[in-house]
Image (spheres, rainbow, N blue to C red):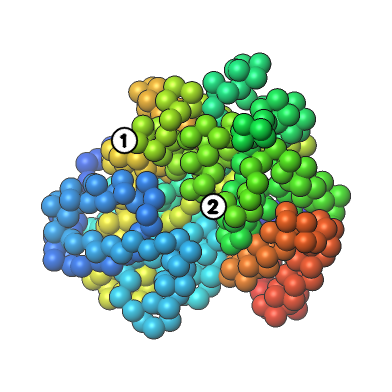
């Protein structure tokens, strides 16, 4: 474990070193029109998702296009299809100028040479914002979403933290004046009083649909707070450890207080159940706050409240998710430079407030220090608290993750359905996962143990 921590520390120092050579905030106004002048008329191609953060940047795009003369063409693709579509585009030398990089794709995209380090562009003052200041991003986000092997490739965009969204009116009716502080408290104290199966009301909903939702939002969320993890320091399965088994068995117990069919629920079903008063609590991404506050999609009104995810015996280690925007290596040089200008603008402090007001979640720290932002958006303070400490490898970010995610999703779902025992499912995942990692070269020294 000491050697593992030394490796993590070394990687962090490498990231810090790469940041140190980049421009710091100099309180200058960036003349983006001047920077973009040589690239006027350039067309950029990027994939966006149908989520609040993307709808927010789309609202602001006319401002960028008017100022720069650079046109941003976006295609909205379901998350489940995005990685495959991007990989096919990169392998086929396609037309994507900007890569949308989920934190679990950063290793794959970087190691395959599909995205470029920002250092290729950040040293060019003609195309770099004097207020780029990478230190103004939350360190956890820049590390998890944008960096791989000590090199910064992308800037954090559409950033999420897992939060506890709850119906404070339902809690008050049940005799509670605050949310549960721990997972154990949620299970043993709150859940029994908040569940009435005759009325089809339940204490909690944990979105668990087979796929990335099962592996990330359900399975991994059950491991970390309880002291468990997917892998040990040697990249062997850690799922049969006492702490990992405790976390997975906890999830089985909590299912008694969830709606029937929870294993088929995705984010939309969980959010809607809270919004319509069918469940009292959910742990969901911060990005769903606009959906829960919109009277067109939610009945909660003033009953909505937000807190950090509960703590386990290992502390508060909430779900971590989100993306970065990176320059595509396949694009022509002129397109790459125009892409770098756009990425800086989209993730900048200059538009952070407008982006948040439009429904996005910025990775910049300063915007959340604004008293008006704190007062307007209930999710801000618990989200900022969650980003003070977290696990960058909440889901391993190496290229093998997509294959392993499918294995975890299959047997994680079977555990919840009772088709395999928790121990039996953990053994199956471990055996199959280690087979994938062996083929990838993690056990014979061909690949560094980076996740």
Q: Which residue is mark 1?
A: 357
Query: Where is residue 136 shown, x and y percent of the image?
Result: 42, 41
The image's mark for residue 268 is: none
Image quadrant in which the C terminus is located: bottom right
SS category of the residue bearing label 1: helix
Residue 165, x across and y down, in percent? 54, 33
Kindly identify the residue that appears in the image at 25 percent across and 70 percent down. Answer: 335
Badge 1 density bin: few <14, some 14–19, many ≥20, Cα 10 Å: some
Q: Is residue 193 left or right of residue 123?
A: right
Instruction: Quadrant for residue 450, please give it.
Output: bottom right
Taking depth in this image into account, of 136 and 46 the one nearest to the observer is 46
Measure the C-alpha gap from mark 1 to mark 2. 26 Å
**Above-or-below relation of 423 to 158:** below
Return the residue at label 2.
266
Q: Nearer the viewer, residue 298 or 217?
A: 298
Quarter of the image where one finds residue 373: top left
Mark 1 vs 2: CB contact within 8 A: no
Query: Farthest residue toward the bottom?
Result: 92
Q: Residue at x 38, y 63 (%)?
A: 77
Where, quadrant-wise, is the N terminus in this rendering? Answer: bottom right
- The answer to whether residue 36 is seen in the rendering is yes
Residue 341 position, x and y percent, is 27, 57
Compared with residue 297, is residue 65 higher up or lower down, i.e. above or below?
A: below
- Identify the residue shown where x is 80% and y is 61%: 420
Please tell me how crowded label 2 is: few (under 14), some (14-19), or many (20+) other residues with Cα within 10 Å.
Answer: some
Residue 340 as seen in the image, left or right of residue 305: left
Residue furthest to the front in view is: 198
């Amino acid at each position: 474990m000491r050697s593992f921590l030394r490796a993590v520390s070394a990687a962090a120092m490498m990231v810090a070193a790469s940041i140190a050579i980049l421009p710091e905030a100099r309180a200058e106004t960036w003349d983006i029109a001047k920077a973009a002048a040589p690239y006027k008329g350039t067309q950029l191609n990027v994939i966006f998702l149908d989520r609040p953060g993307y709808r927010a940047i789309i609202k602001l795009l006319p401002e960028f296009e008017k100022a720069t003369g650079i046109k941003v063409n976006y295609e909205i693709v379901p998350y489940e299809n995005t990685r495959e579509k991007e990989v096919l585009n990169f392998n086929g030398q396609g037309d994507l100028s900007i890569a949308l990089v989920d934190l679990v794709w950063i290793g794959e995209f970087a190691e395959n040479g599909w995205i470029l380090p920002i250092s290729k562009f950040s040293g060019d003052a003609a195309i770099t914002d004097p207020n780029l200041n990478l230190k103004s991003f939350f360190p956890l986000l820049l590390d998890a979403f944008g960096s791989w092997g000590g090199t910064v490739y992308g800037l954090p965009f559409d950033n999420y933290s897992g939060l506890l969204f709850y119906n404070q009116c339902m809690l008050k009716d049940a005799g509670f004046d605050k949310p549960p502080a721990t997972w154990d408290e949620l299970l043993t104290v709150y859940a029994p009083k908040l569940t009435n199966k005759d009325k089809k009301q339940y204490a909690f909903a944990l979105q668990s649909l087979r796929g990335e939702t099962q592996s990330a939002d359900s399975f991994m969320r059950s491991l970390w707070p309880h002291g468990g993890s997917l892998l040990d320091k040697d990249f062997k399965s850690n799922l049969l450890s006492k702490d990992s088994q405790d976390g997975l068995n906890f999830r089985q117990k909590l299912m008694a207080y969830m709606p029937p069919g929870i294993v088929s629920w995705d984010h939309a079903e969980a959010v809607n159940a809270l919004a319509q008063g069918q469940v009292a609590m959910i742990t969901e991404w911060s990005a769903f706050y606009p959906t829960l506050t919109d009277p067109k999609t939610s009945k909660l009104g003033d009953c909505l409240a937000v807190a950090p995810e509960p703590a386990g015996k290992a502390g508060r280690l909430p779900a971590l998710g989100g993306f970065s925007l990176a320059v595509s290596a396949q694009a022509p040089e002129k397109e790459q430079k125009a892409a770098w200008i756009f990425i800086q603008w989209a993730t900048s402090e200059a538009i952070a407030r407008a982006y948040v007001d439009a429904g996005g979640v910025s990775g910049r720290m300063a915007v959340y220090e604004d008293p008006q932002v704190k007062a307007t958006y209930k999710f801000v303070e618990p989200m900022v608290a969650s980003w003070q400490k977290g696990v960058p490898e909440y889901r391993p970010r190496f290229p093998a993750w997509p294959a392993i995610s499918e294995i975890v999703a299959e047997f994680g779902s079977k555990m919840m359905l009772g088709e395999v025992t928790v121990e039996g499912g953990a053994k199956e995942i471990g055996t199959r996962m280690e087979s994938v990692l062996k083929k990838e070269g993690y056990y014979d020294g061909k690949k560094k143990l980076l996740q």
